[in-house]
Image (cartoon, grey):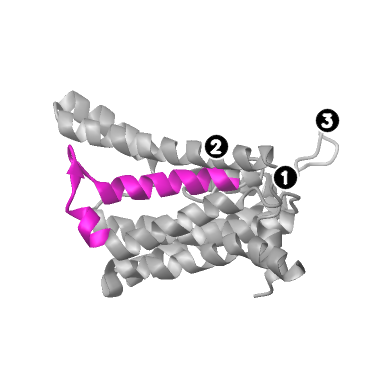
């Protein structure tokens, strides 16, 4: 893959094409981590809606340990998002050439840690949650905040509820009958480009989920090492390019 293309995917000056291509890669990774992570620890780590609902249910049922565990999952996700914000703003203040590389490098490092040390991390718990679950929640928060900042909140990759909602809205517009002469003040038109983009992101998440489940089933934690490779390539490309230009 040409190094200039990789640099454009995380460049500060954004294009719709770069956002789309980066979103596809990250949606695939998120789907793989979510599905593979469920097989590993029995918990989806990007579904904060479910985690908050679980905290409420367990609180009412008196399962304080599980309530605290859900709270730690939520905190880990928020900490990941906060880390991305800190890294990006720090890079902006230093006038870095590529302000989005650091979060990608960190995510790649975490995926490598997950692949290499996953079995060991799974044996350690805080209350009723394993360190590996907290690591995955942190990673999902990190990634979701990154694509949110890059695309100005147009693209999400770690959960698809919003994407499916937008697809439904556009499908409703698509099948709407604009009758002639009925006095309508405006014509309802679907955003076909949004349909294509969001449909592709949902598909990438699903395909990633299938591959992640297959990878974990047959290769275990080490399957995530493969997922880290495109993130490593994108995060290191700006440094490699600057090195070639010197």
- Cα separation, mark 2 vs mark 3, equals 46 Å
Residue at figure coordinates x 75%, y 54% from the top left = 15
Q: Quadrant of the N terminus?
A: bottom right
Is residue 201 on the magenta stretch?
A: no
Query: Which residue is painted at 30% across and 35% down in the image?
Result: 72
For the stretch drawn in magenta, the main secondary structure is: helix
Q: Nearer the viewer, mark 1 or mark 3?
A: 3
Residue 208 location, quadrant? bottom left
Please give left or right for residue 108 compared with residue 148 in the image.
Answer: left
First along the sequence among labels 2 and 3: 2
Residue at the spot 22% in from the left edge and 31% down from the top edge: 67
Residues 36 and 126: in front is: 126
Q: Is residue 203 visible?
A: no
* The magenta segment: 118-147
Residue 233 circle label: none
Q: For the residues marked 1 and 3, what is the alpha-carbon distance in whole angstroms? A: 14 Å
Q: Is residue 13 above or below residue 221?
A: above
Q: Is residue 103 left or right of residue 140?
A: right
In the image, 227: left or right of 37? right
Q: Indicate which label's residue lies in the foreground, 2 or 1.
A: 2
Extreme front residue here?
246
Q: CA distance from mark 2 to mark 1?
A: 47 Å
From this view, report whether residue 215 is shown above or below residue 84: below
Rendered image: mark on residue 177: 1
Contact between marks 2 and 1 (CB within 8 A): the answer is: no
Q: For numbered disc 3, what is the local secondary structure?
A: loop
- How far across and down, in percent of the image, does residue 3 sit? 68, 70
Q: Residue furthest left?
A: 62
Residue located 67% across and 49% down the image? 175
Task: From the image, tell me which residue sits under label 2.
Answer: 86
Category of crowding for the residue at label 3, using alpha-carbon neighbours closer than 10 angstroms: few (below 14), some (14–19), many (at least 20): few
Tell me the residue that label 3 is attached to: 185
């Amino acid at each position: 893959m040409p190094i200039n293309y990789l640099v454009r995917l995380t460049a500060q000056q954004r294009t719709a094409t770069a956002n789309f291509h980066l979103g596809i890669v990250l949606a695939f990774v998120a789907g793989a981590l979510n599905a593979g992570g469920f097989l590993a620890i029995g918990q989806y780590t990007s579904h904060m809606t479910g985690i908050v609902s679980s905290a409420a249910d367990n609180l009412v049922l008196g399962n304080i340990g599980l309530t605290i565990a859900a709270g730690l999952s939520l905190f880990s996700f928020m900490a990941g998002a906060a880390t991305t914000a800190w890294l990006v703003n720090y890079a902006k203040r230093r006038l870095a050439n590529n302000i989005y590389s650091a979060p990608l490098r960190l995510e790649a490092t975490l995926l490598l840690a997950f692949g290499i040390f996953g079995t060991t991390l799974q044996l350690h718990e805080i209350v009723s949650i394993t360190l590996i679950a907290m690591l995955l929640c942190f990673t999902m928060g990190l990634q979701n905040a990154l694509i949110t900042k890059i695309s100005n909140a147009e693209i999400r990759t770690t959960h698809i509820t919003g994407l499916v909602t937008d697809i439904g809205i556009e499908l409703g517009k698509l099948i709407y009958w604009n009758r002639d002469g009925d006095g309508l003040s405006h014509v309802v038109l679907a955003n076909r480009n949004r349909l294509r983009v969001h449909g592709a992101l949902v598909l990438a998440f699903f395909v990633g989920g299938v591959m992640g489940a297959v990878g974990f089933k047959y290769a275990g934690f080490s399957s995530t090492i493969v997922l880290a490779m495109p993130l490593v390539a994108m995060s290191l490309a700006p440094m490699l390019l600057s090195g070639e230009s010197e």
